[in-house]
Amino acid sequence: MYNHIYNYIILLGIVMMAFLSCKTIEHTWFKSPDHSIEGVNIEILNIRDEFKAMYINKLENFDYIILTRDEVDKMILSSLLNDNDESYFIIVRALYTVLGGTYSAILNNKNELLISYKVLSRRGYRNKKDVLLLKLEVPPKDVYITSRIIR
């Protein structure tokens, strides 16, 4: 009888160690590409914190939303717009684990956008939702969202 309990405890310990050693913690917004994405770095624009929760809710069913110029003017800290600019401003899903890491946005020549977050940490944490504002020449065809803890 005690052998079964002892074996169960050992098995449970092995499963927990494997779970805690994971470097990537997945989330419903997590979407990793099955191929390498290399391209140009896209500047991530700073938005006011009070807009983040509203757009997190709006992005529940979409990878990104194209914004109007009026919406962008309200949410950024400084004016980036000029009358001749025909760029698209999009608010896109993002994930983070622990504050203090860095986001990157990479767009390749197939118009695939990779949003990634990397942070140096000793412990695993659950991913949390975030949003980023990007300025693009054309809207992306596909969006990939990743978050990784580097140990």
Image (spheres, helix red, strand yellow):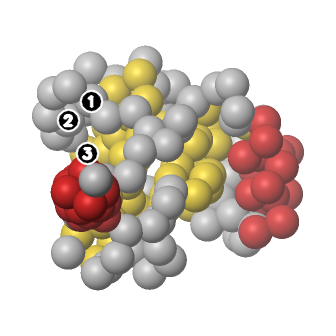
| Cα distance between the residues tagged 3 and 2 | 10 Å
Which residue has dot 3 on it? 40
Q: Residues within 10 Å of mark 1 (few under 14, many from 20)?
A: some
| Cα distance between the residues tagged 2 and 1 | 8 Å
Which residue has dot 2 on it? 37
Q: Is residue 65 left or right of residue 102?
A: right
Q: Residues within 10 Å of mark 3 (few under 14, many from 20)?
A: few
Secondary structure type for disc 3: strand
Q: Residues within 10 Å of mark 2 (few under 14, many from 20)?
A: some
| Label 1 with label 3: CB-CB less than 8 Å | no
Which residue has dot 1 on it? 33
Q: Quadrant of the C terminus?
A: bottom left
Q: Position of residue 19 (x, y in %)?
A: 30, 56
Q: Quadrant of residue 144?
A: top left
Residue kind at label 2, given as amino acid type: Ile
96 or 77, nearer to the observer: 96
**Which residue is pictured at 45% across the width and 67% down the height?**
125
